[in-house]
Image: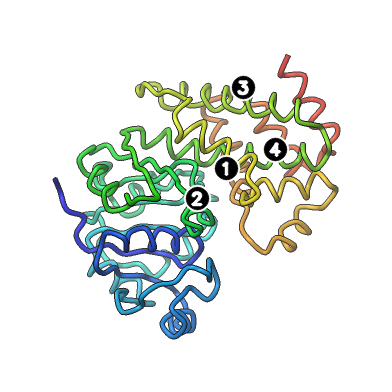
Amino acid sequence: MQSTGKIAIMGGGSWATALAKLILNNEQRILWYMRRDDRIADFIRDGHNPAYLSDVAFDPSRIDFCSDINKVANEADTLVFATPSPYLKSHLEKLTADIKDKFLVTAIKGIVPDENLIVTDYFKKVYGVDDGNMAVIGGPCHAEEVALERLSYLTVGCQDIERARCFAKALSCNKLRTVVSSDVIGIEYCAVLKNVYAIASGVCQGSRFGDNFQAMLVSNALKEMSHFLQIASPDIVRDMSDSVYLGDLLVTAYSRFSRNHNFGTMIGRGYSVKAAQVEMDMIAEGYYGTKCMHEVNKRYEVSMPILECMYDILYRRISVKKAIAHMADSFL
């Protein structure tokens, strides 16, 4: 089996912190890139991330922290990117190191705004990374539950299945089960879309549409996701009931840890987009994903009434009641 070599975590948020904790169950040392030296100093002093999942304890002596992205990229063999998708380009602004021969793992469940590209396509376009040198992480797995050491499940997707198995082994432990897949495109697009549908679920809850309607919404969201993938990625045979598709959709649509669901709930209660973003003080990637997927779907022209409903509410400022009533008619 291939080796992951030196693993670097690229990002300092909650998902990056959860992944670092998982990997340190199997690796003696990791590199960890964080942009802010003050956060690094606080982490080393206190033994935990000062800003995210602060209850999770680490042994800083096993971590090589660095705020120089090029130094980390040059020293590591495997780069695990775990930043909010809207900030990916700004995080990479200073990256001049040649990473095309590194093994890149994206744990980013979003799409690159303005570019309207899934993350692997962005790395391919901008940095010349081959498909076989990239993997994605998906599945029903909130960082908060990983931190609480609750049994969780992840899928590692890569066109090179042996590389997927190798990295999956680096994540696996008694509280995390892993499976592998070759459906990189499907995993990435589903990770974007399930955030959009989680906002829709939250909007409906905030608007008191009831459990019956919620169930209908989520079942139609799975159909909508499946129809999109059949057009955008027709060469892969996939079972949409697998955890990386249906499971991730369910946990994001219903969990109290879901930022997107919570964001949607506030919109359903009458908050403006800006007010909801300010109160959350965290990134709801589905907000950006809604606009990006609206643009992406102009190429494919798939019927996606839930996506369009969220675009109407979030970007066209159409009333929640009117937009959902129009969407509901498509469920018949």
91 lies above or below 217: below
Secondary structure, mark 3, is loop
Which is more N-terminal, label 3 or label 4?
4
Task: Name which residue lies at 46% across and 68% down.
Answer: 12
Secondary structure, mark 4, is helix
108 lies above or below 62: above
Marks 2/1 in contact by CB < 8 Å: the verdict is yes
Q: Nearer the viewer, residue 111 or 4?
A: 4
Q: Position of residue 36 (x, y in %)?
A: 47, 78
Which is more N-terminal, label 1 or label 4?
4
Q: Assign the C terminus to one quadrant of the image.
A: top right
Q: Which residue is mark 2?
A: 112
Marks 3/2 in contact by CB < 8 Å: the verdict is no
Q: Amino acid at mark 4?
A: Ala
How many angstroms separate mark 3 from mark 2 (CA)? 22 Å
How many angstroms separate mark 4 from mark 1 (CA)? 16 Å
Q: Residues within 10 Å of mark 3 (few under 14, many from 20)?
A: few
Q: Nearer the viewer, residue 215 or 78?
A: 215
Task: Name which residue lies at 31% across and 71% down.
Answer: 70
Q: Which mark is residue 292?
A: 1
